[in-house]
Amino acid sequence: MTTKNTNIKDFLTNNLLLENKTNSLNESDAKNLEVLRGETTEKPKIYIGAGTCGLGAGAAKTKAAAENFIKKNNIEAEIIETGCIGLCAYEPIMDFHIQGFNRISFSNVYENKVENILTNMFGHNIPDADILGQFPTENENWENVKSIYEHPFFEPQKRIVLQNCGLVNPIKIEEYIARGGYANYLKAIKKFTPAEICNKVEKSGLRGRGGGGFPTGKKWKFAANEKADQKYLICNADEGDPGAFMDRAVIEGDPHRLIEGMAIAAFTIGATKSYVYIRAEYPLAIERLKIAIEQAKQYGLIGKNIYNTGVDFEIKIKMGAGAFVCGEETALIHSIEGKRGMPRPRPPFPAVNGLFGKPTIINNVETFANVAEIIKNGEDWFASIGTKGSKGTKVFALSGNVKLTGLVEVPMGTTIRDVIFKIGGGINHNKNFKAVQIGGPSGGCITEQNLDIKIDYDSLIEVGAMMGSGGLVVMDEDTCMVDVAKFFMDFIQRESCGKCIPCREGTKRMLEILESITKKPMNQNEALERFNGIIQLERMAKVIKETSLCGLGQTAPNPVLSTLKWFKHEYEEHIFERKCSANICTELRTFTIDVEKCTGCHACVRKCPTKAIIGNPKSAHFIIEDKCIGCGTCETVCKFDAISVK
Amino acid sequence: MNIEINNKTVTANNGETILDVLKRNNIHVPTLCHMKDMLPTGACRICVVEDINSGKLIPSCSFPVYDGLRIKTHSQRVINSRKTIVELLLSNHPDDCLYCVRNGNCELQNLSDNLQVRERKIRGQKIRYKLDLSSASIKRDPEKCILCGRCVRVCEEVMGVSAIDFINRGSKTVIGTTFDKGLNTSSCVNCGQCIMVCPTGALSEKKHFPEILEAINDPEKIVVAQYAPAISVSIAEDFDLKSGTDVNGKLNAALRRIGFDKVFDTTFAADLTIMEEGSELINRIQNGGKLPLITSCCPAWIKYAEEFTPDFLDNISSCKSPQQMLGAVLKSYYAEKQNIKPENIYSVSIMPCTAKKFEGQRDEMTNNGITDVDAVLTTRELAELINTFGIDFKNLEPELTDSPHGVRSSAGKLFGVSGGVMEAAIRTAYFKLTGKELMNFKVNAVRGLEGRKEAKVNINDMDLGVAVVSGLANAKKLLDEIKAGRDDIHFIEIMACPGGCIGGGGQKINADEDALKERMKALYIIDEKETLKVSHKNPEVIELYNKFLGEPNSHKAHELLHTSYQKREVLL
């Protein structure tokens, strides 16, 4: 095989896409395929984890250092940017692959470490660096280096959606095809009818990964059964939950997987046009997706009459301006139509009356990313993974006070405890676990007593949480749960579209009530109103939940209700004792002056913004609690450590 | 299919919403964002009912019925939810009902009353917004807005203007114009239909009371009033009289009680308009002028044309509207005849319209630096003024209008309803072209409240194609057809408000479609009963031509009664 693109294209098209002849290849072709699959290499390759997380950690500098190194030493080597392998906490990650040896992965490779690592690696020595592990193949093993899959972060995972992320060059379609990609699409459109695929997906038990968990095959059937001159397919990549970045990582790391899934779905429902609605805050994902779409066009996988099957497929990228509510399907449709992103009542559902009034199916990135694998391995294989009601795997974005933050993909049925303590390595700084927020601002928190529930759409709902799109924010003992509820409420009330009254007005009022209990009332009137507000909190939450127009409003009170359920004592402490044990709600803090230590220097008196400190110079001072706003200025200016939180 | 409402089985049809069925069965469920004949938006959630099958609260306005549906419309859960929603609205609403223009006529007030909201349970920070007083016609008070979106929809769907829309997000959401500038910089055509659908005092007309009262109390000033054809059949509703009662005589009497020195009828000028516009039509047809000719009586349509369809400006009749014609005649011919200095005349018109306020202050509507019309009152404002002056309207003895410019034909009276200008014009054009009066005088094809009516009128073996549209979105559709090559229409009447001036933006708020029909009926009854049925036989119009103007479209007539239009740049 030569290096000319056209020939690679012909080779891949004839031997992998149209027919699988990989078992009958001649030796040189088989070798080249191995190279494309990353099983072996000819030229030395240096992989840099350059997803948004990696770049944030300094991957660009790492890459530059690697480039300098090979230039300086006149070495011929290829430097490849990959997406994120999932271990965001250990970025920048750099992999090294040299002929005859396994690919080996290093973590925390800041620019100053590059030279040492590469010098040693090119000398076939293991450097003194943070090694993640090696990727076992038929090549020679690096001695005393464990397989990366034995790493506690990876060991319990089952990677279907993320299988290529961090490994392949995301903007090289050849690598995707070499690993079996797009052949599933051609198989789908050549061998199956849309109804057959609908059945397969339905039988596989795949449910929407965007939050609601509606059975995907069933949803497709609605649209497939509609008769229309035009149907649309939309990929919802408007990932807006705080602490969720699964979709971004999939698109940055393996964009072709999304395209293939969409192509199969479009064929199934009879849509020739599709959109990827992606937030503009994901420039790298957008860039890589654009390149991937172009490459798929060059391979004839997007366009008219694909491989003479009469199937047309087109993808457009539509950038969203960052409104959280545009993740709601009808608001998203409005946004694509050029209208204000506001939801509309359903029914009619988009599957019947969607984009531009036509039948439309909207699925989330992760849902589409599963589709090709179902075609490839069969619905029974997929249905064998997971629990009774929830099949397959789920990708989670693990963040917060956990040791190993990052992206994990686990089979449904894994316990939350395993995700946090086995994969995530437990709580940072050896603190105690307090709760984990699942499902973002629409979800709820899970406490110690429920940590052993199995991840499953239905079981999560039973404990007052929800799967959501997959954000897992871990909180340690120093977290104030009232503050957490306030954070999500503030987010929701800012992101409410403003259309329906309960959500628009109610979330604002709920936020105000939470704000009022996280600070001291300044007078009797405020104290009364504070109580009055608390009495209304649950009533308001119920009405917002029951009467709001869309999912955003219907789930908006969840963080409050959930924290109220599990951490009622914290609310009570804030309300009755006007105290925040976690010391997070600064406005509730009360300071006291140690009369033994106070020298009466007057520094605190001069700096106190509310004139809450009294005392004669050179004698001990006192704080008037009613005036103190808990800002802590006095504590900072005191040179004698006389002031502390009560 | 059968559904169960409050334990009673009722029949429902496929495609109906729950609300449709409730209405048919006289079960009242409150609504705020719902608008008849428009797609539901489901925004306010006030109309929720309890779905027993799913246990959920569902919006009745948008939820389609299905066989076996079981609902409760007034369960405790439903009432509590509605009440909480209203309380939430009130928590962000100014507490100034007593000072509000809609006090006693406010849907939010009624709703909180019906739901027994008697104490302020939910408190919170109210959002403050500035008043928008920039428009000549419409005052906006966003603090009172409950964001039901009815104004946005009427502006977009009925008027095709889209001057206003939702801006910002969450609790900061507000309805505003492009770049949130004043309404005067927007594409707003001042039709006032937004006011008609506003449930609260967020939208109201710009009041002209102080100026008028000042003029009335100024001994130097001769204060004259004119009222539009639609007023006499509309204002009765404000005084507990049956919709469509013609109170022309009482109207004259009331205006004089308030202190107007002279009272004229704009309908006289409607006849004058027919003389001018009719001649213009005949002239264009006979001399190959630009066709179709489009009427110019509606100031909202004129502004719309200047903004959205400037290609058609040459098609629009150069005639001023009747209001401006009468204003111009009063400050020229009448002043001269009565020996009054034109600047000492303070001319007030009473219109079913808010756009007339804008029209009155247009630069073109002046003669030698003197404005034709000084102040415009809407029907609503006049009713308020009558109440302020303690006039027992119901029991007033009818009086006659002042003369000259008080006599009118019943053709001119038809200007108040969509199709009326067309019918009056056809009567006169028919006579001018054939020398004979139109049989029966009736042109039934242009009557009725439909948004578009078309007819062919045979005059001298020529098929005159006429079209009548009301609602500017309908006008846009027709003009698009003409732009695309349709050439069988020679004369078009365009009124901005659905149904014409009887449905104008200055009329009584909360009047229903039945009231509109009664007003229309009243105008046709007047036409039926009266003998002077054509504009060209109005003796005072004939006298005005003989003594002052010469003939229709004369130089003098052009100076006073005609105007020009130009493309208008606005923020779209």
Image (tube, coloured by chain):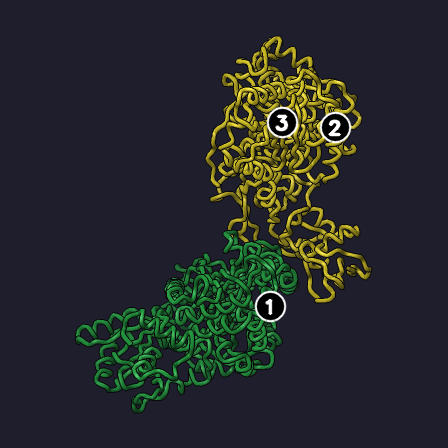
Chain colours: A green, B yellow
Can you say whether B536 is above or below A450 in the image?
Answer: above
Q: Which residue is drawn at 78% across and 23% down?
A: B529
**Percent position (x, y) of residue B351?**
64, 28
- Same chain letter for marks 2 and 1: no
- Same chain letter for marks 3 and 1: no
Distance Cα–Cα, label 2 vs label 3: 23 Å
| Mark 3 element type | strand
Between marks 2 and 1 in the image, the one whose residue lies nearer the viewer: 1
Label 2 resides on the chain identified as B
Viewer-proximal residue, B274 or B153?
A: B274
- In the visual, does B460 lie left or right of A360? right
Identify residue for label 3: B464
* Occupied quadrant, residue A595: bottom left
Identify residue for label 2: B524
Is residue B531 something one can see in this rendering?
Answer: yes
Between marks 3 and 1 in the image, the one whose residue lies nearer the viewer: 3
- In the visual, does A570 lie left or right of A642? right
- In the visual, does A496 lie left or right of A300? right
| Mark 2 element type | helix
Mark 2 residue type: Tyr
**Percent position (x, y) of residue A420?**
48, 80
Q: Given contact means CB atoms under 8 Å apart, are the residues at marks 3 and 1 in contact? A: no
**Percent position (x, y) of residue A426?**
45, 82
Identify residue for label 1: A221
